[in-house]
Image (spheres, rainbow, N blue to C red):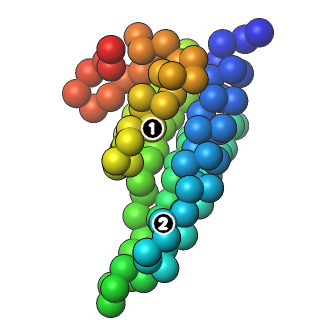
Amino acid sequence: MDRVLSYADILKQTVQIAAADQPSLQAIKLYPVCDTESGHFLVLATGWDKQRWMNTILFHARLVEQQVFIEEDNFEESLTEALIENGVAPKHIITPVGAVG
């Protein structure tokens, strides 16, 4: 199987699972955004955090050829680590400070 396709599948599944885990104490909803054509995979958080409207990107990864570029990973339990556990090779993950692993 083509590695790029499997990485897209892993990214999509990871983002969808993370978004399904909704915060219970606040009126914030998580939304998965998976665009396999452009290679962008995000988790958006929107809603009211006490008296303030929240609209933020919790996770953003770009898939370019066989590389996964992590633009944001603001999850307490890193989605980058979940990607590795689900089959993305650490050498194919690029973070703002360099390669993971």
Which residue is depicted at the point 71% across and 21% down? 5
85 relative position to 7: left or right? left
> What kind of residue is marked 1?
Leu
Instruction: State the separation of the CA atoms marked 2 and 1.
Output: 16 Å
Residue assigned mark 1? 79
Name the residue tied to disc 2.
Answer: 23
Does the rendering let one see residue 47? Answer: no
**Residue ID at (62%, 23%):** 7
In the depicted view, which residue is nearer to us: 25 or 41? Answer: 25
The picture places residue 92, in percent across and down from the top left corner, at 45, 15
Asked if 86 appears above or below 61 in the picture, the reply is above
Where residue 72 appears, as percent x and y from the top left, is 36, 44
Quarter of the image that includes the C terminus? top left
Relative depth, front residue between 50 and 99: 50
Can residue 66 be seen at all in this image of the molecule?
yes
Q: Quadrant of residue 41?
A: top right
Residue at left 65%, top 18%? Answer: 4
Q: How crowded is mark 2: few (under 14 residues within 10 Å), some or many (20 or more)?
A: few
- Using residue 48 as the reference point, say whether residue 2 is left or right of it: right
